[in-house]
Amino acid sequence: MKNPLNKRLPRELKGDIGKYIVIFIFLVATIGVVSGFLVAGTSMKTAFDESFDKNNIEDGNFVLESKMTDDLKTKLEDEDLTLYDNFYKEETYKSSTYRIYKMRNDVDKIELFDGEFPKADNEIALDRLFSENNDIKIGDKVTLDGKEYKVSGYVAFSDYTSLFKSNTDMMFDAQNFTVATVTDNAFDKISDKNLNYCYSYTFNDASYSEQEKHDKNTDIKELIAKNAELKNFIAEPDNQAIHFSGDDIGSDTSMMITLLYIVIAIMAFVFAVTTSNTIEKESAVIGTLRASGYTRGELLRHYLVLPVIVTLIGAVLGNILGYSVFKNVIADIYYGSYSLGPYVTLWNAYAFFITTVVPCIIMVLVNIFILSKKLSLSPLKFLRHDLSKKEKKKVVKLPDFKFMTKFRLRVIFQNKSGYIVMFIGILFSNFILMFSLLLTPLVNNFKTEVIDNMICNYQYVLKVPVETDTKGAEKYAVTTLETDFENSDNSDEITVYGVDKDSDYVKAGFVDRNSVFVSEGVLEKFGLKVGDNLDLKTKYDDKTYRLTISGTYKYPASLAVFTDIENFRNEFEKSDDYFSGYFSNNEITDIDDKYIASKITQKDLTVVSDQMTDSMGGMIPIIVVFSVVLYMLLVYLLSKVIIEKNANSVSIVKILGYQNGEITRLYIMSTAIVAILSVIISLPISYLFMKAIYSEIIRSFSGWLTFYIDPMVYVQMLVLGILAYAVVGALQFRKIKKIPMEEALKNAE
């Protein structure tokens, strides 16, 4: 005999086709995005990892003040390594810095993205991302050192996958900094004014462990420091230009998977709530089937079929879209931030498993948990439409409210399980929405804070002390140290300034010569307070310093320490007249450029915010749309269930003469109250979660951005919630209009 339950599936699907289509589309989109993220991330990470051997990426590099002597070269080669000249020259064009190299064939090879490598002396190949950001096309001309070059192609430097001008920078700068390559002859013709004697090296023994590499790099650094004037040294594991992108690609995998599972769990609860409503409507049929010998397990399996089928088909289709469409979207986002080489899409069995099998398992478990309780009732209870496991309690006595208010409260109490799911879903969607909306104001606030608290308009760092007659120029000393915390493998760069006690630029209010003030970011990032000790060490010889914090100074541009210049000279064993540069509100023109190591202006200080805005710009609208759609989907489905559950009551109210508008105020307004209250309650909860997560995320950056939420973010969230519900309410109003008056008569017992 054919199973009558199988005949019911098409009718159940047809009766709730709208619900299944909406959930199906959302599942396809969510799984597709996560699948695309995992596939693109894994494929690009594999390409990145393989590029180390493919392009013979260096094990380290260093910059000397002058060309390496033969004696030092011999000593280094005795350390069982291979040295490569990797000299570069820097020129400026349209306010952007071009770091120019010769073509490389042996180390840190360059990958061609489009066009051709330079063949003629008047040709140059530029980094792809920088060119796109500045709208430089192949065939365009750039002028460097007074000579015009034609852009022959776009390239990706294997040692500059992130465009860090300096390894100590908080953020890369793909807007104002680029690496480029020209022919050997063209390189030699460029002025040596900004020539940097950079050398790269690779270990001859590829079997070194990470610890052995670390020890080897330390020995090499000390050897160079003893035999030459070392300007910079970067071991490959510490090189942000190499590793920043690789560390980021796929780093959000756990977060994306968690996001997927939470969304699936919420969808599973929605399925369970709506299926519970179906069970209540069909209680007489279920009671008859149970009395006829059908087991609870058979009924449970029947009600699991549609959720699992919808999830499975949605997962398969989502994976197809993930491999074909969404992986390109995710790859474009990575390519929009990093200067990565080409990659090949790889099959990812793990991604398929966690985006197909696991969602189905979650769907089954959640529905079994909820529906098994519902189906455990006796056949008699089903036949009597008495689906409460407990004895009926007395109706809660409400205060002497108006009729409409009492009615709405009754609707809310009767559908509390659905409203609880709605609150959880709204909380989750609002958390995502808050994350997307706070990013731009946070970065803009950081930029404003940096500008408002600049030390001066022009900050000069000199190669050698040189006097100036520029009015208002003030001498200062500076050095860069690293944090030296116990039980910490990571260190942060700290800039230590020595300034005049009565400085016109840094008004720290030093109490005495030994006072040490730190920027607020130092306290926030490392959990310190005034009176604590800050342990620092030198970058190359690990000499340690312990500074006692006397106070704070508002300087958000970097993690910084300020002390009196005399204390600075004593602490770091400098001469009585030592200084490193000048603070000035006027541009200094009487010092030759060859003596200036760097000139820091507002543009340099705000590069972090500019780059973050550019990198995140494409993602923010996607996150906003996702969170709003999730909100609307949950409210729509659950309010639909509530209206269907109360269809008989709605019909009776119509018979009593109430108009559709009045009925809407009873039922849709009840859901509106819960939805808006959920949005309001979720705001402080989302804030607390966000602040906790933000602190952990930002600690991985080399600098610090103070947590900030623009008050307008809360207004935007509330307005979006109201507008989204207005759309849902309009859809549900149509459903109320379609409920006929004969519904009550048809279901009369």
Image: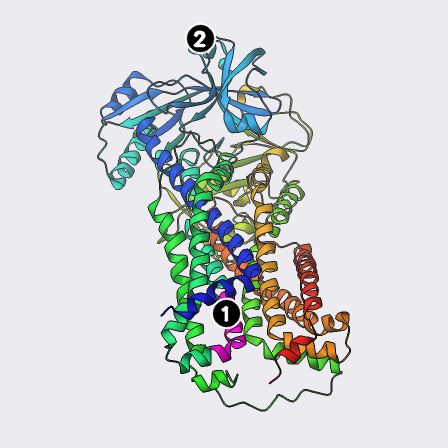
Q: What secondary structure is marked by label 1?
A: helix
Seen in the picture, residue 279 relative to 485 is either above or below; the reply is below
**On the rendered structure, is 360 left or right of 272?**
left
* Label 1 vs 2, first from the N-terminus: 2
Residue beneath the point at 32% across and 27% down:
54
Kind of residue sitting beneath label 1: Thr
Residue beneath the point at 78% across and 78% down:
657
For disc 1, the neighbor class at 10 Å (few under 14, some 14 to 19, many from 20) is many
Q: Give, as a single range, the part of the protein colored magenta.
A: 270-285
| Residue receiving disc 2 | 185
User: From this viewpoint, is residue 483 visible?
Assistant: yes
Q: Determine which quarter of the picture holds residue 131.
A: top right
Q: Position of residue 354 (x, y in %)?
A: 38, 53
Q: Position of residue 67 (x, y in %)?
A: 38, 17
**On the rendered structure, is 500 left or right of 487?**
right
Q: Determine which quarter of the picture holds residue 347.
A: top left
User: From this viewpoint, is residue 492 visible?
Assistant: no
Kind of residue sitting beneath label 2: Asn
Q: Nearer the viewer, residue 430 or 728?
A: 728
Seen in the picture, residue 462 relative to 85 is either above or below; the reply is below
For disc 2, the neighbor class at 10 Å (few under 14, some 14 to 19, many from 20) is few
Q: Determine which quarter of the picture holds residue 729.
A: bottom right
